[in-house]
Amino acid sequence: MTVGMFWGKIMILLSKKTIGAIGAILAVATVSPAYAAAGNGTASVKILRAITVTKSSDLYFGKILPSASASTVAVAESGARTCGSGLGCYDTATSGGFHVVGTTGEVVSVSLDSATATLSDGASHSMTVNLATSTTALTLTGGAGDFKVAGTLNVGASQADGTYTGQYSVSVNYQ
Amino acid sequence: MLRNLAAIAAAVLFSIAQPVIASDLLVAPTRIVLDGNSGGEVMVSNTGDKTTTYRISLVLRRMDATGQINPLDEALATPSDAAALDIINYAPRKITLAPQQPQTVRIGVRAPPSLAPGEYRAHLLFRAVPDAATIDAPAPDAPKPGQPQGMSIALTPIYGIAIPVIVRIGAIEGKAVLANAHLTPVADGARVTVTLQRSGNRSVYGTLDVLAQGSSTPISTVKGLAAYTEVASRDVSVTIARDKLPAGPLVVRFTETDPAGGGAVVEAKVARGA
C-alpha cells in the first residue's frame, strides 16, 4: 500500500493487484476504516475515481476483392457488412468495440478525432474509411459501458491487391 | 428495459472476454481543478497484459449544447485556450509501463501575475502507442488454394482517455440552475430531459438525481456531469424504466460536487408531457 499526498488529502493507493483487477473506484465499498487507518493516524481518505478503456473488437472489413468500378464496403455497429456492388467480400467483419469501466452512474463523452482515416498498402496505394459512432454520451450503468464504431471503406476502381493498414483515434472524455 | 438488459448482457459478455485483452489503460482521478500556482498528479496504470507505451498530450476540447465533448480545431483556439496550454505543465510526456505497473504524471501550473482572472481549461489525453504487432492484427488469413487473394485491411484504433485540467485564477463565481425539465414517453419507460444552465465565469460540475417528489431516494443518478464555460446551458437526458417510474410528480436535483460549488443544490419539477 502506498500512501501519498494528494490535494492536501491523504490518498491511499490500493495494491497494484486490486487496481488492475477492478479499478480503484470499485474498491470504495470494500475499504474499511481499519484499512484506511493502517498507514496513518488521521481518517481522511480519498479514493480516486478511475477509468479504464479496453478495446473489445477491431473494426474489420474482412477480405475484399475489388472490381473495375469504385464501390464501398460498410460495416454497421452491429457488425453487419454491406458489400458494394461488384465487390467480393469474405471473412467475418466486425465493428470496432470498446469497453469503458468507471464509477457507477458516471457519464462520459465519446469522440472520434477524425471522421476519416486513410489506409495505405505501404506502396503508393491508399483508401479512405469514413468512421462513425452513434454513442456520444455513455452512461456507465453498473460502472461499465460499451460503444461501437462503424465504418465505410471506399474502394477504388481496380484497387490494387495487398494488405492495407491505417489508424484511427477515439477518445473517452471525462467532464 | 430492453436497453438496460442489453447493457447488462454486454457487460457480462465483456467481463468474460476481458482477460485476453491487452493494452488496458487506467487513469485516476478523472478531473483536476487547480489554482494559480499549484500542482497535482494523475495516476496512470497499465491494466493490460503486455508492456505498453503511452503518450500524454495536452489538448483542447469543446462542449456543445448536447453535452458532447469534441476535439477543437487548433485554428479555432481562443487566447484563453492558448493561455491554458501555456500555463499547464506536465511530465513525463511518454511512459512505458509493464503490465499492472502504475506511474504518476505530475501537473504544474505557472500562471503569470498578469493573467486575467477566470477559468482556463485544457484536457490531458492519455493514449496507448500501438506497436508493430498491434498494427498487424487482425492477421490476414493465408490465402487458401484456389481462393483469390484480394485485399485485407487492418485498421488499428488508437484509443485514449481525456480528463479536464481546470485552472482557476482570481475571483471566480458560478451557479447552476435547472430549467425546462420534462418527461417524454419512450418505448420502455420515459425519458427525463433537463437543461443545465450555467452562469458566472466558472464551469459547474456535479450529480443529477431524478426523484419522486417528497422522496429522498433517487430513481436515477447521473454523476460527473459538467457544463463548461463555453456553454451557457447543456441538455441532459435520463431514461427511466417503466417499472421504476412513480405515478406522482418527479423532480430533478443537481448537486454541485465541484470544490468551488460548495455543495449547492438546485431542483426543478419535471413537467409531464402529453
Image (tube, coloured by chain):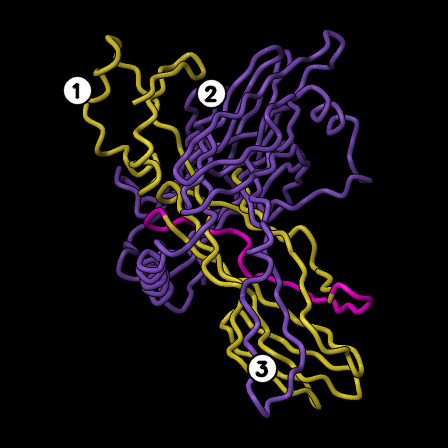
Chain colours: A yellow, B purple
Q: Quadrant of residue B149?
A: bottom right
Residue type for callout 3:
Pro
Q: Position of residue A53 (x, y in %)?
A: 46, 47
Residue found 33% across the figure and 62% down from its top: B13
Residue type for callout 1:
Ala
Q: Quadrant of residue B183?
A: bottom left
Q: Earlier in the sequence, mark 3 or mark 2?
A: 3
* Chain letter of disc 1 in the image: A
* Chain letter of disc 3 in the image: B
Q: Badge 3 is on which residue?
A: B143
Residue span colored magenta: A122-143
Residue found 48% across the figure and 38% down from its top: B225
Assess whether residue B140 is covered by the magenta stretch.
no
For mark 1, does the 10 Å Cα neighbourhood hold few (<14), some (14 to 19), or many (20 or more) residues?
Answer: few
Q: Secondary structure at mark 3?
A: loop
* Picture quarter with the N terminus of chain A: top left
Image position of A159 with respect to A105: above or below: below
Q: Position of residue B102 (x, y in %)?
A: 43, 31
B2 displayed left or right of B133: left
Please check whether the numbered discs 3 and 2 fall on a single chain: yes
Marks 3 and 2, how far apart at CA: 60 Å
Q: Badge 1 is on which residue?
A: A34
Marks 2 and 1, how far apart at CA: 27 Å
Q: Badge 2 is on which residue?
A: B259
Marks 3 and 1, how far apart at CA: 61 Å
